[in-house]
Amino acid sequence: LLMLVPLGQGLWSDLGAEERTRVEKLEHNYERMLNKAKKAKDKGKTARAAKLQKNADNLNNAMTKAQLRAQKAENTATVLIIAGLIGLLLVKLFEGAWANIIYEKHYSRWRTNRGTKSGLNWTAAVIAVILVTTVYATTLYRFTATVPPEFLVDFPVEKATYQEPATRWIDTKFDAATIKFGDFFQRIAKGIRIVLEALETMLVDTPWPVVMSVIVITAWRLAGPRVAIFTLAALAYLAVLGYWEKSMSTVALLGTAALICILVGVPLGVWFSRSDRAYSVGRPVLDFMQSMPAFVYLIPVIAFFGTGKPPGVIASIVFGLPPIVRLTNLGLRQVPLDIKEAAEAFGATKWKILTGVEIPLALPSIMTGINQTILFCLSAVVIAALIGAKGLGFDVLVALQYAAKGQGVLAGLAILFCAMVIDRIVQGSFRQTHDARSKSP
């Protein structure tokens, strides 16, 4: 079908029609401008006549270029026909080779199992011919017609018929929910603000040498000297270029969102691994949270929580929660059943099996989920600058608004270093713990 479109355009379509229509409009304007220039000259208005004549000359130049484009478009008909024929030939060769392979496999299955469907189903064949003919004819007409019908270009429905009533209905429901549950939303925002302010006190208000020393020592103890050296270099970049306070504010937003995601996501993952019914209900919600564009779910966050840092944290939670839930559920489901049965045979309780057997065996998957959640929350925190979360995302937003390339690159590198430091510390900590367990007798 894709190859028939250029072939049909070359054979039947009037390729220069659009440019010729433009030429006709330009010619009309050109003649009108010439008449105005002539009248102005007759009245003795020399300056105005010269200006109008110059406009007429510009229109004449534009008309000449449009005529050349129309001629060039008409000359491409032969090229389109040749390209369409070559493409159609290649497609048919590929279809023939692929159909031969498929037919051979189907024939082999029929030889071993005579119950395999074979022969021609006339009902299906007639329906297929009708559908293919309709699709081909409609598509070719759409691309070859000079002025295709409006119903083929756009869906034949008025915007006021469905979209505007649906928009008003959603606005009404959002407003009603905001009024009815306003106190509940404010309590959630207040709880998040308490955690966020505590982290900001630790990271922003505490003297920077103390914070830097603690982070580097933590990286050394948890992930080793190489990660500690990289962490020191990244923190030095943030400090020297003046991003220290904004980086720590961003990390505080990230830490609040990631902490809530872990506290909520891990128990949800455990529950989903225990109950297929709960997972069947929660899976579409997780799919919605993960596939919905980030800018779209900022809308209900603004409607219910307003703007500022707590709404930014909530937006980050919505974006970062699915990975930890999914990977916790996956890791627990992959624990071998015989190991759980052995622990149960030795008298272990369900809680002891969960904490002493399943979670340790599922820890690689859970740690991967935590790592992904942290990085997802960091990317969402940057987007949340649109609703007043500030931090490094605000610098990126300003750079985008004013095309400040240098500022955007430097702020982007600062975000990159924050993500890499967190990722290296988390992964290094898990790797050292795993190596210690593997070496223990």
Image: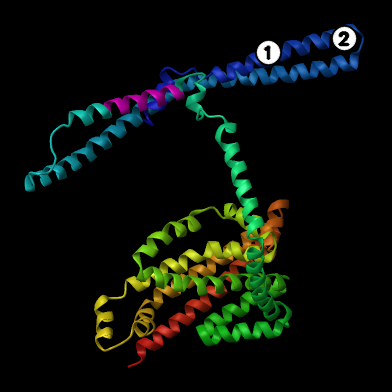
Which residue corresponds to mark 2? 41
Q: Which residue appears at 59% of the width and 43% of the height?
A: 169
Q: Is residue 134 magenta?
A: yes
Instruction: Kindly identify which numbered label has been placed on residue 27.
Output: 1
What span is in magenta? 129-143
What is the quadrant of residue 204 in the picture?
bottom right
Task: Inspect the image, locate mark 2, and give the three-letter code of the amino acid beneath it.
Answer: Lys
User: Which residue reaches farthest top?
Assistant: 42
Q: Which residue appears at 45% of the width and 68% of the height?
A: 325
**Sequence-first disc among 1 and 2:** 1
330 lies left or right of 151: left
User: Compared to 145, does 109 lie above or below?
Assistant: below
What is the quadrant of residue 116 in the picture?
top left
Residue 178 position, x and y percent, is: 65, 56
420 or 45: nearer the eye?
A: 420
Q: Which residue appears at 26% of the width and 36% of the height?
A: 95
124 or 211: nearer the eye?
A: 124
Q: Residues within 10 Å of mark 2 (few under 14, many from 20)?
A: some
